[in-house]
Image (tube, grey):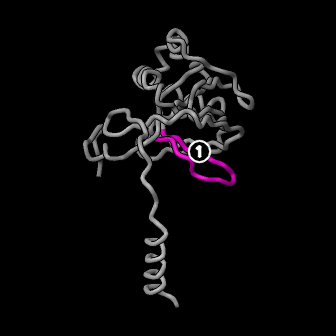
Amino acid sequence: MNLQWNDRRTRQFITNVGLITSDGPYGPDVMTAEWTHHISYSPSLIAVNIRGQDATAHNIIESKEFGINLAGEEQNVVSSICGRYSGRHVDKVAVLKGMDVKFYNGNKIKTPMVSGCAMNAECKLQRYEEIGDHIMFVGEVLEISADETVKPLIYHNGKYWMLKENIEKPSADVLTKIEKLVEQFKKIK
């Protein structure tokens, strides 16, 4: 089955907003990628899916490194700029600097990193593979930092959202009831 881009049925996913930084044949670049996921703790691996024709894909393949910068709630404009224009045709880093967005140099990679994010991870390309109409890049985290005062920007149904109130986990009474039911219905006793 194929689904068209922006199909309403696929808009039910809730994702973070990754600002993917790279430097290579197209120069320093930042693109927005909602398909950005932590996939392993040991070693720490992050995967991001990018279209093969994007400047970022070419930069990562050439340089073998990239930055993952999870946008904060105040970075919706940054995300919009990075997702709307191609690094093949626009120097998005210069545009963002013109909007007073700050960057810093990575400690372990030569790629610029975006300041003010909820999380920043410097990654060495471990592998990449074409999967469907995107390339999945898997990077090993070389350095990571998180600012817990910055809440991550959320993307759902084509719009940006903020995290709101926490929904509590089940109470001790409910957990006890669950444990009794699990014990009662174990397949192997």
What's the amino acid at mark 1? Ile
Number of numbered tags placed on the structure image:
1
The stretch of residues the image draws in magenta is 35-49
- For the view shown, which residue lies furthest in the left direction? 8
Badge 1 element? strand
Q: Nearer the viewer, residue 2 or 159?
A: 159
Residue 150 visible to an observer of this rendering: yes
Q: Is residue 38 magenta?
A: yes
Residue 181 in the image, given as x and y percentages of width and height: 43, 81
Q: Nearer the viewer, residue 3 or 130?
A: 3
Please give the residue where the numbered disc 1 appears in the rendered image.
46
Residue 13 in the image, given as x and y percentages of width and height: 36, 46
Q: Nearer the viewer, residue 130 or 155?
A: 155
Q: Is residue 174 magenta?
A: no
- Which of the 4 quarters of the picture holds residue 60? top right
* Neighbours of disc 1 within 10 Å: few (<14), some (14-19), many (20+): many
Q: Is residue 49 above or below residue 83?
A: below
